[in-house]
Image: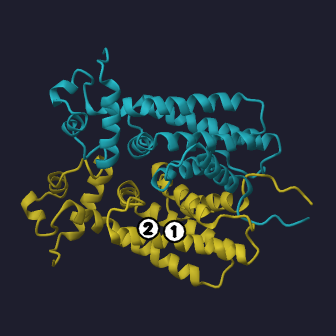
Chain colours: A cyan, B yellow
Amino acid sequence: MPRPSRWDDVVSAAARVFSEKGFGGASLEDVANEVGMLKGSLYNYIKSKEDLLFAIVRPNAEELLDRTRKLKEADLPASEKLRQIAEIHFEIIDRQLPYVTVYVQEIAGKGLSPEWTAMDREYLTLVADVIAEGIEEGDFAESTDARMSARALIGALNWATRWYQPGGPAQARAVAGQLAGIFLGGLLARRRG
Amino acid sequence: MPRPSRWDDVVSAAARVFSEKGFGGASLEDVANEVGMLKGSLYNYIKSKEDLLFAIVRPNAEELLDRTRKLKEADLPASEKLRQIAEIHFEIIDRQLPYVTVYVQEIAGKGLSPEWTAMDREYLTLVADVIAEGIEEGDFAESTDARMSARALIGALNWATRWYQPGGPAQARAVAGQLAGIFLGGLLARRRG
């Protein structure tokens, strides 16, 4: 469908409405009011509320996936890749909190459509593969469960949408570094040998 | 309000409906249909959809808080307390997945009401206090940020509602142990000194 000129306004209005009212609680009428157009005019842009949900979330989800794919191929130790995974995640949360909130709240891990299930699975697999790399290289403990660790890390990162207050790129990087540090180093003190 | 005889049916029907449709997308009519009564009769049990949400979630939230409070006072090393925090969390998820899903999806960290904000904050503080104890006792690394680590752990545990498939107490304990192990030991291999 061609996108008439107020497409960007429609998407950002929908993100605000969905993140305030929840996807289920928000109506297309709410979105139309927020953007200041008649509900009927919205149908020039989208066919359903789901279309709007996916339009909101897709650019950020694609950015996250794309950067993580490239990072996986980079010539860096797994621990550095993991740190950068956290950085990318927080950078996007910092920049696009309402959109990421809608994604985490409404889509992630919910198997809504084959397309989104595939994207969720690819992201989980990329993170788990980086962790498996670290195990192979001997940097990560042999006993590590790569998939479980990836789920734990992704969960902790997604959960940040419930507590993180955006404060710019430097703050996002600092928080990502602390979070990655917890996963890499663990809480237990390293005894001197 | 006195609770007529089908109260338990109403609460469990509402949990199923809310976890399938989302709280925003579900109506009291859906709940009435699920339990097999007229919508008007529901008002003998509750005043609003929010009442039903809180009724669903309260017993599990209170159990979690109560057991964590007792655990914090127990005479155990912080690392063992942390392991048991994960076990309690997974035991409740395993036993009551639809209820915990509704809590995580609709309430946790959202500041919906002073009462729930206080419960969220108490849980975060209990977990952070256990981690701070471990730092003081020298078991956890001095550089640990207790509050950030607590948020990461709680996030990873709550996120399990999106991927964990209930399989009984033994499986729940095993998964909790793996997850706690990641937070305690970290991914990095411990070099022999």
B167 or A82: nearer the viewer: A82
Q: Could you tell me which secondary element the residue under label 2 belongs to?
A: helix
Q: Amino acid at mark 2?
A: Asp
The chain containing the residue under callout 1 comes to: B
- Label 2, residues with CA under 10 Å away: few <14, some 14-19, many ≥20: some
Above or below — where is B164 with respect to A99? below
Q: Position of residue B88 (x, y in %)?
A: 52, 69
Q: Position of residue B85 (x, y in %)?
A: 56, 70
- Residue behind mark 1: B124
Q: Could you tell me which secondary element the residue under label 1 belongs to?
A: helix
A5 or A11: nearer the viewer: A5
Asked if one can make out residue B164 in the rendered structure from this viewpoint, the answer is: no
Instruction: Give the Cα separation between the discs numbered 2 and 1.
Output: 6 Å
Horizontal arrangement in the rendering, residue A156 relative to residue A18 (left or right): right
The chain containing the residue under callout 2 comes to: B
Q: Residue furthest top?
A: A2
Q: Tag on residue B120?
A: 2
Q: Amino acid at mark 1?
A: Leu
